[in-house]
Amino acid sequence: MHAERRTKIVATVGPASESSGAIRELLEAGVNVFRLNFSHGTHAIHALRIENIRKAAAEMGKHVAIMQDIQGPKIRVGEIKEGAVLKNGQTFVLTSREISGDEKIAHVSYERLALDVPVGAAILLDDGKLELKVTEIQGEDLVTEVITGGPLSSHKGVNFPGCSLKISILTEKDKEDLLFGAEMRVDLVAASFVRYPSDILEIKDVLMAMGGLVPIIAKIEQQEAVMHLVDILAVCDGVIVARGDLGVEMLFEELPLIQKRIIKEANLAGKPVITATQMLDSMVSSPRPTRAEVSDVANAILDGTDAIMLSNETAVGAFPVLAVKTMARIALETEKSFPIRVERPEMENPYVRPIQDAIGHAATHMAPELGAAAIITPTSSGSSARMVAKYRPRIPVIAMSTSPEVCRRLSLVWGVYPLLIGSAGNIEQLTQTSVQVAMEAGFVADGDLVIVVSGIPVGTAGSTNLIRVEIVASVLGRGLGLGRRPASGVARHFLDPVLANDNIQKGEILLAPTTDAAWVPAMQKSAGIVVSSSGLSSQTALVGLELGVPVILGVDDIGKIPDGQVVTLDPSRGLVFRGLVKI
């Protein structure tokens, strides 16, 4: 099976990467999810980007997700006179009044500014580059002292670390963007500035009113979100470690441990987690990353992140394709030493479904013991594939779905490779079809052992309740098997016992219409016996049992088994397989 990267790559589409040619190059480099940042660009621009992504993915036969990242209630300063510079120690006023700003005063897009921000609070501007301290409140104005000064320009972000603000999770712009996303059938929605579980539920209500329910990825970038992380994970469909605003809202020295905690909790919940912001930031203008950036990407993978995200690197950078290739190389190298995660999280976690969790754990634990080549998960919603992937098996998790949408959404999940299949009427048909499609895709080959995780009834979301072990092999013959162990060897056809006794080599498989006492010398040298005659009390059956040689009786069309073909006998099921098969 060809080597596959398990960690997924999210790339932000922008002016540097929006053309159809650039999209194709990014897909070839390894992008799994394309992010559209709705803080920038018109609906017409995003529609063209979506068209280019879908066209390229269809032509290349790839399942790639489109994630709509809505702006959210970002608080910003208003218009600022060009050249404004704040100096340390000066007085600077922030107000909710609509005014033009300069080096002395600025409008802030939050109506309750003077009500919710107390005296003594710290205020950060432009991602923390400037710091203010509130010294006085005058009506709608906050009078502040500049602690760390610097240049200030229009529409820069404002953060209030430690302050609890009363902000609606969705602006009118966000609602318009969500409606556009629903019409364009985006695969995922990234929700900005989530603070409470109720924020996710509010967005879901809006999406349902629009006629659909798209998985919501919560961006963890507020102090309140970190405090309510477990409850948010219970209602969202994944999270982003949004280290930009998070690093401003929290003490920067706390950020590495907060990142590890977010990833760990998401892993326990079986929800995909994306690590984002400045992962390869130097590659916006340089063809090589810094050593610190390489370590940052690798450590996020070792922490357990499902995906790593590029922002400016691919949106406006000079080397978007090279940035993706670099990230893919780091991921592949890091995964070579990735530990298998078979320890089982506590079942008391409120967001874990016990049956699915137990089956995902069991499948991952069984895989190395059986030498399995893949875990195949037929799935209607994607949940069974996610529950297996949460334990980070070393072998691929092949998700089979009849839904193109499910396939695209699973492109975000660590170690999952989605494949599209046709519908199946029962579990046997579903299993056979899934194994066949996995073979055609090159993930498994004749002789491989696979673990199939599925559910009964077929096609019911969330019904994962079944583990099967299957052999990937062509069946050359079926009959009644006798014996305790399988056997493999070269098939040799004989019609005459004398020729068989003289010519069969030790360890070969004897094939004949029937046998009697005259065939015993050949039977003693053979590793297994296949005959077209039947009868549990026949000479073939009795001698085979006495010699401890596996026997397959009553195989019709035995002549269709090619002479000289390596075969494997499975007496427990009475099957003759083509090739060397592990049973």
Image (cartoon, rainbow, N blue to C red):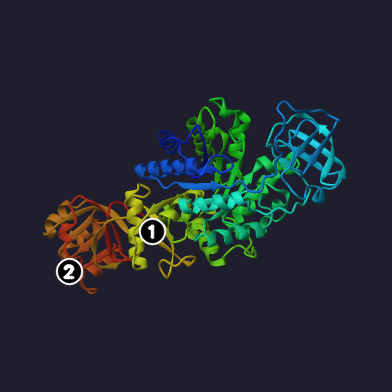
Q: Residue at x 73, y 31 (%)?
A: 152
Q: In the picture, which quadrant includes the C terminus?
A: bottom left
Q: Secondary structure at mark 2?
A: loop
Task: Using the rendered image of the protein, determine whether residue 239 is visible from the camera's viewpoint.
Answer: no
Q: Residue at x 35, y 42 (%)?
A: 59
Sort mark 1 into few (<14), some (14-19) or many (20+) by Cα contacts within 10 Å. Answer: some
Q: Residue at x 53, y 67 (%)?
A: 355
Q: Relative to 372, say whether 54 is above or below.
A: above
**Count of numbered marks:** 2
Q: Is residue 80 left or right of residue 233?
A: right
The image position of residue 553, as x and y in percent, is 23, 67
Q: Is residue 427 left or right of residue 276?
A: left
In contact (CB < 8 Å): disc 1 and disc 2: no
Residue flagged by tag 1: what amino acid is it? Thr
Q: Residue at x 56, y 25 (%)?
A: 286
The image position of residue 367, as x and y in percent, is 47, 55
Give me the C-alpha separation between circle 1 and circle 2.
43 Å
In terms of image quadrants, where is residue 467?
bottom left
Q: Which residue is mark 1?
A: 402
Which mark, by number, is residue 533?
2
Q: Is residue 330 left or right of residue 484?
A: right
In terms of image quadrants, where is residue 452?
bottom left
Q: Relative to 1, say whether 577 is above or below.
A: below
Q: Secondary structure at mark 1?
A: loop
Q: Nearer the viewer, residue 555 or 509?
A: 555
Label 1 or label 2, whichever comes before in sequence order: 1
Q: In the picture, which quadrant includes the N terminus?
A: top left
Give the foreground label among 1 and 2. Answer: 1
Q: Relative to 528, say whether 294 is above or below.
A: above
The image position of residue 160, as x and y in percent, is 76, 44
Task: Using the rendered image of the protein, determine whether residue 124 is visible from the camera's viewpoint.
Answer: yes
Residue flagged by tag 2: what amino acid is it? Ser
